[in-house]
Image (spheres, helix red, strand yellow):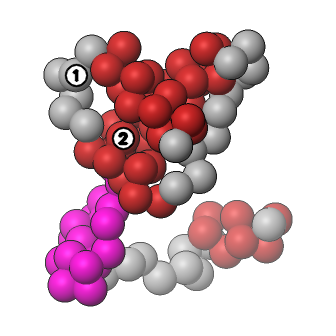
């Protein structure tokens, strides 16, 4: 790690070309049909897992089904947290 930091400080690392912030890879992922979960989606998953865990007396109940996880991640951000928690609890019960 130290060598990497030193190389960066000395200008030895190449800078990436193309759009920054992931925009360059997004068209490729979409073309391949990859479901991308953004930061907001991960926060929804986290909230749903924590809510389902709280209902079961645990810190969290992991959503292990990929389709359910993607559904929870895609839940509209305007949705009430209780609705997301209910969806997660239903996934856990299924």
93 relative to 76 in the view: left or right: right
Q: Which residues are magenta?
A: 19-39
Question: Residue at horizontal 71%, vertical 72%?
Answer: 4
Question: 93 and 5: which one is in front?
Answer: 93
Query: Where's residue 70, x and y in %?
Result: 37, 53
> Does residue 24 appear left or right of residue 52 in this picture?
left
**Could you tell me what secondary structure mostly forms the magenta stretch?**
loop
Task: Locate residue 16, reporting x and y percent.
Answer: 38, 78
Instruction: Tell me, yes or no, whether the highlighted magenta stretch contains residue 31.
Output: yes
Q: Judge whether residue 16 is colored magenta.
A: no
Which residue shows up at 73% across the image and 13% down it?
57
Q: Quadrant of the N terminus?
A: bottom right
Mark number, residue 72 = 2
Q: Residue at x 40, y 23 (%)?
A: 86
Q: Are marks 1 and 2 in contact (CB under 8 Å)?
A: no
Of labels 1 and 2, earlier in sequence is 2
Task: Rate crowding at label 2 as few (under 14), some (14 to 19) or many (20 or more) other CA atoms within 10 Å.
Answer: many
In the image, 8 versus 80, the foreground residue is 80
Q: Nearer the viewer, residue 63 or 29?
A: 63
In the rendered image, residue 15, in percent from the top left (x then y), is placed at: 41, 77
Element type where label 1 sits in the image: loop
Badge 1: how crowded within 10 Å, few (<14), some, or many (20+)? Answer: few
Q: Which residue is mark 1?
A: 79
From this viewpoint, is residue 24 visible? no
Q: Is residue 37 above or below residue 52?
A: below
**Image x and y of residue 33, in percent:** 25, 79
Residue 57 seen by the camera:
yes
Q: Secondary structure at mark 2?
A: helix
In this rendering, the answer to whether 58 lies above or below 75 is: above
């Amino acid at each position: 790690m130290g060598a990497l930091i030193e190389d960066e400080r000395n200008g030895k690392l190449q800078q990436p070309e193309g759009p920054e912030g992931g925009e360059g890879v997004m068209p490729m992922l979409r073309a391949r049909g990859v479901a991308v979960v953004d930061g907001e989606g991960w926060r929804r998953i986290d909230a749903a897992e924590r809510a389902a865990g709280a209902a079961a007396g645990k810190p969290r109940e992991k959503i292990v089904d990929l389709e359910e996880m993607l559904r929870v991640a895609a839940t509209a951000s305007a949705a009430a947290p209780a609705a997301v928690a209910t969806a997660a609890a239903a996934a856990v019960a299924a």
